[in-house]
Image (cartoon, rainbow, N blue to C red):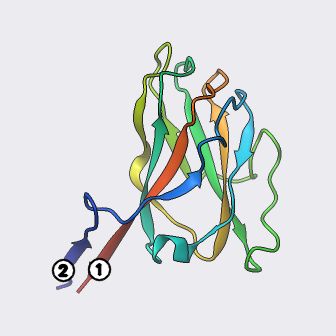
Amino acid sequence: MAKFIHHTGTNGFGSAVSLMGSTDLNALSSGGTVTGSQKQQSDFASAQRALLVLEVLTAGWNVSAGGNLTGWFLLSPDAGSTYEATITNVGPARVPDFIIPLPTVSPIAAGLYVSEGPYILLPYGYFKTVILNNTGANTSSNNHTLKAYPVFDTYV
């Protein structure tokens, strides 16, 4: 019978990879999208899954009931030259790769907010991350970040 082994790094995860830097999510309009920089699987030490964490550094915007950030990994079939199509302020025409639900508070508190799941599958090859703001309000301009913490699993 196969045995599951969870390889751990700091706090059980690999080193964080920034999907959205300290200015990417600043003042993002409600219903607006933003696209991060190119990443590739080797940036995650070839991990297949990750924990996504939105870090809100200071109290921010007012989130409506059911508010969230929806995200997609835009795939590149040719090593980063072209990416799958997306529509501004809508995203790609497919199911999102992850959702980060946010509490209905006024304003949202500083802290860490984790994607549903909590682990998401990482894409292979080259990709960019797109975020759609579904919170009902513009994000504040307080250096919010979106990071992925790789998880390494092995079956022996």
Q: In which quarter of the image is residue 30?
A: top right
Q: How many labels does the image show?
A: 2
Question: x%, y% of residue 112?
Answer: 40, 37
Labels 1 and 2 touching (C-beta < 8 A) = no
Residues 138 and 145: in front is 145
Ranked by sequence position, the earlier of labels 1 and 2 is 2
Q: Which residue is drawn at 17% across and 85% down?
A: 1
Tag 1 secondary structure: strand
Residues 23 and 29: in front is 23
Residue under numbered circle 1: 154
Residue under numbered circle 2: 3
Question: x%, y% of residue 121?
Answer: 48, 64
The residues tagged by marks 1 and 2 sit, at their Cα atoms, a distance apart of 8 Å
* Residue 115 against residue 3 in the figure, above or below: above
Q: Which residue is drawn at 63% across and 31% down?
A: 134
Tag 2 secondary structure: loop
Residues 21 and 31: in front is 21
Q: Residue at x 75, y 52 (%)?
A: 93
Question: x%, y% of residue 17?
Answer: 50, 60
Q: Describe residue 9's horizontal placement relative to residue 142 as left or right.
A: left
What's the residue type where badge 1 is placed? Thr
Q: Residue at x 78, y 64 (%)?
A: 84
Q: Quadrant of the C terminus?
A: bottom left
* Residue 19 against residue 43 in the figure, above or below: above
Question: x%, y% of residue 120?
Answer: 46, 58
Q: In which quarter of the image is residue 32?
A: top right
Mark 2 residue crowding within 10 angstroms, few (<14) / some (14–19) / many (20+): few
Q: Describe residue 72's horizontal placement relative to residue 85 as left or right.
A: left
What's the residue type where badge 2 is placed? Lys
